[in-house]
Image (cartoon, grey):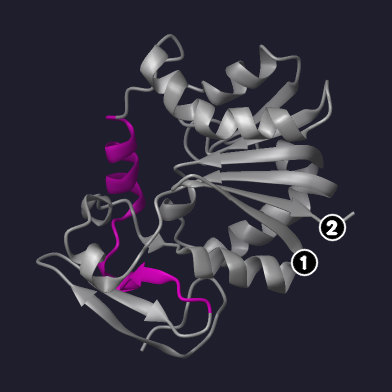
Amino acid sequence: MHHCPLCQSQDTQHYYQDKRREYLQCSQCELVFVNPDQRLGAQEEKAHYDLHENNPLDQGYRRFLSRVADPILERVEPSSHGIDFGCGPGPTLSLMLEEQGHTMSLYDIYYHPDTAVLDQSYDFMTATEVIEHLYEPNKVWQQWLNLVKPGGWIGVMTKMVIDVEAFASWHYKNDQTHVVFFSRNTFQFLAERDQLKLEFIGNDVILLRKAQ
């Protein structure tokens, strides 16, 4: 059986099977993840992302991103420095935050691959519709913790697992680039392990604050 890609536990078991992929679950952190043998290669993954049309002028897209932007704006100090991790080909959240007086850096493995920005530390970071794509979530999670200063905020947007019955008809799992699926319990596990303050905003926004 495959080990958990998030907490590295060896205690994982079968969770669900559909026509294309098997999904496993970790007994420790409750992460649900695609069998690593059934994930897309890098070129196939990139080709899928190239189809995304994220336009900063799209008001609907801005409303969608405001679900994480607004609570971040309520919590960070004026003129803070943030990083949008996994910003994609049409960075929009960063523009929205810059319009409110913050300074933003960008990182994306395909579209903004300048790793120099990962050597700095920030007052806050955002990752919208990113965490479900990560082949090595443990490695990236540690990166995120290192990116944020003590007292800083991590804002995540992702759809969360409820139970196996809901999972069976869940459209979110059908995206071939979605390979790890968090639940509230998964985020609670991480918050307790890493001493983070945890807040859930609605159904798909998670805020974590690093200890001072």
Name the quadrant containing residue 14.
bottom left
First in residue order: circle 2 vs circle 1: 1
The residue carrying mark 1 is 195
In the image: residue 138, left or right of residue 122? left
Residue 203 placed where, x, y %? Answer: 44, 48
Q: In 3D space, how far apart are the residues under numbered discs 2 and 1 (Cα atoms)?
A: 6 Å
In this picture, residue 188 sits left or right of residue 11: right
Q: Secondary structure at mark 2?
A: loop
Which span is picked out in magenta?
29-51
Q: Residue at x 31, y 73 (%)?
A: 35
Tell me if mark 1 has few (under 14), some (14-19) or many (20+) residues whose alpha carbon lies within 10 angstroms of its own.
few
- In the picture, the quarter occupied by the C terminus is bottom right
Question: Does the magenta portion include 41?
Answer: yes
Query: What is the crowding at mark 2: few (fewer than 14 residues within 10 Å), some, or many (at least 20)?
Result: few
Q: Nearer the viewer, residue 94 or 41?
A: 94
Are the residues flagged by discs 2 and 1 in contact, CB closer than 8 Å? Answer: yes
Please determine whether, in this image, residue 2 is positioned above or below residue 80.
below
Image disc number at residue 211: 2
Residue type at mark 2 is: Ala
* Depth order, front residue of 208/48: 208
Q: Residue at x 81, y 27 (%)?
A: 80
Residue 129 x/y as whole percent:
44, 42
Please give the name of the residue rendered at 33% of the width and 77% of the height, measured from the top-left corner: 24
Determine the residue positioned at 56% across, 35% down: 68
The amino acid pointed to by label 1 is Gln
Q: Position of residue 92 (x, y in %)?
A: 51, 21
Q: Residue furthest top?
A: 57
